[in-house]
Image (cartoon, rainbow, N blue to C red):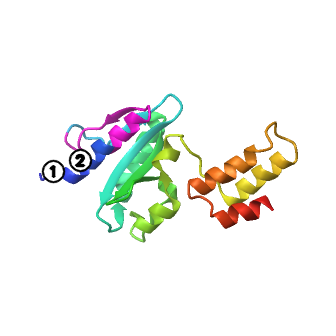
Amino acid sequence: MPTNKKGDRRERELVNRLDDAGFAVMRAPASGSATQRELPDVLAGNGENFYAIEAKSSAGDPIYLTGEEVQALVYFAQNFGAKPRIGVRFDREDWYFFHPSDCYTTDGGNYRVKKETALADGTDMAELVGDTEKVTLEEATERGTATTDGEDDDPDEGVRKLLQAVADGTLTVDEAADALD
């Protein structure tokens, strides 16, 4: 059976990144070699969040997972008490994560993640590990309004969150400016 050296390297990279973020991490044995049960590629937890991750990488082509792979991931995650995540990594890009229900399902019942979708809609590593939070324009506007209504102890908190959303690339400068008006 041929080995997937690049895929193995990417999985080890993911494990190291999660470990660096303070997660206890375990890479599961290669699919089908150690057990009859399908296991996710990576298990990670930090006492608050527990993830079962199916990791896939690609040079740039869309990433496909079979319906069976995703069903096995969800089944394992539910029984283990973890959140199922599909982790995708395209060359020259970072890791992005999706709940299986957020992935496109093909007519044949398989799952697909395109590079553009990962960059636009995926949860990045910082958000997955809790370092940042993705904020929509509507949420940022609501938070900004709540702080300017005096409901918060720190009136600058809404502005800080808008600036952070701009820094994270979640909002454009114009969207943040509109939210402040």
**Residue for badge 2:** 8
Q: In the image, what residue occupies the spot 56% across and 58% down?
A: 169
Q: Is residue 51 left or right of residue 34?
A: right
Instruction: Tell me the number on the disc at residue 146.
Output: none
Residue at the farthest top position: 47
Which segment is the magenta one? 14-33
Q: Nearer the viewer, residue 147 or 16?
A: 147
Distance from disc 2 to disc 1, alpha carbons, whole Å, reads 8 Å
Q: Name the front one of labels 2 and 1.
A: 2
Q: Quadrant of residue 60?
A: bottom left
Residue 40 in view in this figure:
no
Q: Residues within 10 Å of mark 2 (few under 14, many from 20)?
A: some
Q: In the image, what residue occupies the spot 71% across and 54% down?
A: 140
* Vertical placement of residue 147 versus 64, above or below: above
Residue 158 colored magenta? no
Amino acid residing under circle 2? Asp
Q: Under tag 1, what secondary structure?
A: loop
Amino acid residing under circle 1? Thr
Q: Earlier in the sequence, mark 2 or mark 1?
A: 1
Tag 2 near tag 1, CB within 8 Å: yes
**Residue for badge 1:** 3
* Vertical placement of residue 34 versus 61, above or below: above
Q: Nearer the viewer, residue 154 or 128?
A: 154
Residue 17 in view in this figure:
yes
Residue 19 colored magenta? yes
